[in-house]
Amino acid sequence: MIPTLAGRVQTRLFVTATVGVVLTALLTPLLPMSFGDAFLVLAAVAVVGVGWELLYHLLMQFRWDKDWPTLFGLLTAVPEGLLMWWLLDQGLVPGVDGPVPFWAFAVMFGVVWIGQWLFVNGPMRVLFVQWRLRGGRLI
């Protein structure tokens, strides 16, 4: 199954709204940031992530099979995380009250990203069989 652009966007938003929300809620009490700031950062990651999907889709058009190897999907966390940290550091994430320490952002982003990646590459393939057959679309 090769995910379609619509399927990639739907999957990203669904997994962020489920797995991402749960992991953020569990992790935030351990970090020096408020729940409000943590969920605003998660929402910003979701919004910026849709833009990343457009870029990834463009880049995939140069691959012969029009798809990423699974490891590439995991490694995309690096540029996405760096961009999100830069946006956060520059004060470009609306609503975030104060400075967020880099280590707190890195822990939250890393745990949420890996949790979502593991979910998509494991349980989601079992729980949503039609998702796999419909190019990653949920709707």
Image (cartoon, grey):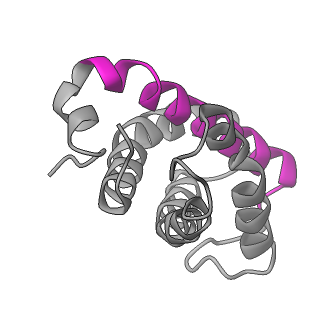
Q: Is residue 12 left or right of residue 89?
A: left
Q: Residue at x 58, y 38 (%)?
A: 112
Task: Where is residue 91? Give x, y as percent.
Answer: 73, 80
Which residue is at 77% across, 50% downward? 78
| Identity of the residue drawn at 37% across and 48% down | 3
Q: Position of residue 6 (x, y in %)?
A: 31, 61
Q: Is 31 rendered above or below residue 95?
A: above
If the image is split into quadrants, where does the N terminus sit? top left
Q: Residue furthest right?
A: 102
Is residue 61 located in the magenta-colored stretch of the structure? no
Say which residue appears at 33% left-offset and 24% top-offset.
Answer: 125
Relative to 34, 26 lies left or right:
left
Query: Which residues are drawn in magenta?
Result: 100-126
Q: How many marks?
A: 0
Q: Secondary structure of the magenta portion, mostly?
A: helix
Between 128 and 24, the one nearer to me in the picture: 128
Q: Position of residue 46 (x, y in %)?
A: 48, 61
The quarter holding residue 27 reads: top right
Q: Is residue 121 magenta?
A: yes
Front residue (pair 28, 6)? 6
92 left or right, relative to 25:
right
Q: Give whichever of 67, 139 is nearer the camera.
A: 67
The answer to which quarter of the image holds residue 108 is: top right
Q: Seen in the image, is 65 located left or right of residue 130?
A: right
Residue lying furthest front in this view? 64
The residue closer to the viewer here, 50 or 130, is: 130
Percent x, y for residue 110?
Answer: 70, 39
